[in-house]
Image (cartoon, rainbow, N blue to C red):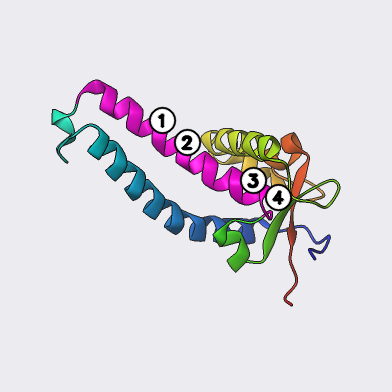
C-alpha cells in the first residue's frame, strides 16, 4: 500500500532513467517493425518520406502506451517499481487509462518547456508536477514490504 509521502524530483528522475532503458528496447523493436513494413534498408536517406512520419508516430504511440498502460494497470512503470514510486489519483487508486494518457500528454509538454513542468514540484507544497496537477494524480512513495 502506498504512503502519502510525496516523491522528490531526484526519485522521479531516477525512475525515468530506468524507464528510458526499457523504452530504448521498445523503440528498437518498433523501428524494426516499421522498417520491415516498408521493406526498407537501414539507410534512412533511401526511405520514402512517409516512412519517417510513420516511424515518428509509431515511436510516440509506443511510448504513450508504455506509460498509460503501466500507470492505469497498477500505477507503476518498471522504473517506478525499482524506485518504489506509484501514481495515484485523489482516491488512492491507479488512474484510468484516459487519465493516464492525458497525464502522459501533459508530461510531454512539461518536458518541452525545458523541464519547467517537472521542476514545478520543487515549488509545489505537495511536490506535484504540471502533469500531476492536470491529471489530478500524484506520485507517492511505496514503502518496502
Left/right placement of residue 68 relative to residue 41 reads right
Which is nearer the eye, 74 or 133?
74
Instruction: Tell me the element at label 2.
Output: helix
Residue on which the image places disc 3: 119
Relative to 103, say whether 142 is above or below: below
Residue on which the image places disc 1: 57
Sequence order check: which comes first, mark 1 or mark 3?
A: 1
Q: How crowded is mark 3: few (under 14 residues within 10 Å), some or many (20 or more)?
A: some
Sequence order check: which comes first, mark 1 or mark 4?
A: 1
Magenta-highlighted residues = 48-75
Q: CB of mark 2 within 8 Å of CB of mark 1?
A: yes
Mark 4 or 2, which is nearer the eye? Answer: 2
The Cα atoms of the two marked residues, 3 and 4, are separated by 6 Å
Residue 131 drawn at (x, y percent): 68, 39
> Residue at (30%, 41%) from the top-left corner?
33
Q: Residues within 10 Å of mark 4 (few under 14, many from 20)?
A: few
> Residue at (86%, 48%) from the top-left corner?
91
The Cα atoms of the two marked residues, 3 and 2, are separated by 25 Å
Residue found at the very far top of the displayed protein: 49
Q: Quadrant of the N terminus?
A: bottom right
The Cα atoms of the two marked residues, 1 and 3, are separated by 27 Å
Amino acid at each position: 500500500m502506498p504512503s502519502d509521502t510525496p516523491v522528490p524530483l531526484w526519485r522521479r528522475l531516477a525512475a525515468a532513467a530506468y524507464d528510458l532503458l526499457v523504452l530504448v528496447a521498445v523503440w528498437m523493436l518498433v523501428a524494426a517493425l516499421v522498417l520491415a513494413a516498408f521493406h526498407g534498408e537501414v539507410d534512412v536517406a533511401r526511405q520514402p518520406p512517409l516512412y519517417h512520419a510513420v516511424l515518428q508516430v509509431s515511436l510516440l504511440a509506443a511510448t504513450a502506451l508504455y506509460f498509460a498502460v503501466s500507470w492505469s494497470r497498477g500505477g507503476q512503470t518498471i522504473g517506478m517499481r525499482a524506485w518504489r514510486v506509484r501514481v495515484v489519483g485523489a482516491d488512492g487508486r491507479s488512474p484510468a487509462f484516459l487519465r493516464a494518457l492525458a497525464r502522459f500528454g501533459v508530461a510531454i509538454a512539461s518536458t518541452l518547456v525545458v523541464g519547467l513542468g517537472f521542476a514545478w514540484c520543487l515549488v509545489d507544497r505537495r511536490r506535484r508536477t504540471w502533469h500531476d496537477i492536470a491529471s489530478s494524480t500524484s506520485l507517492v512513495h511505496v514503502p518496502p514490504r
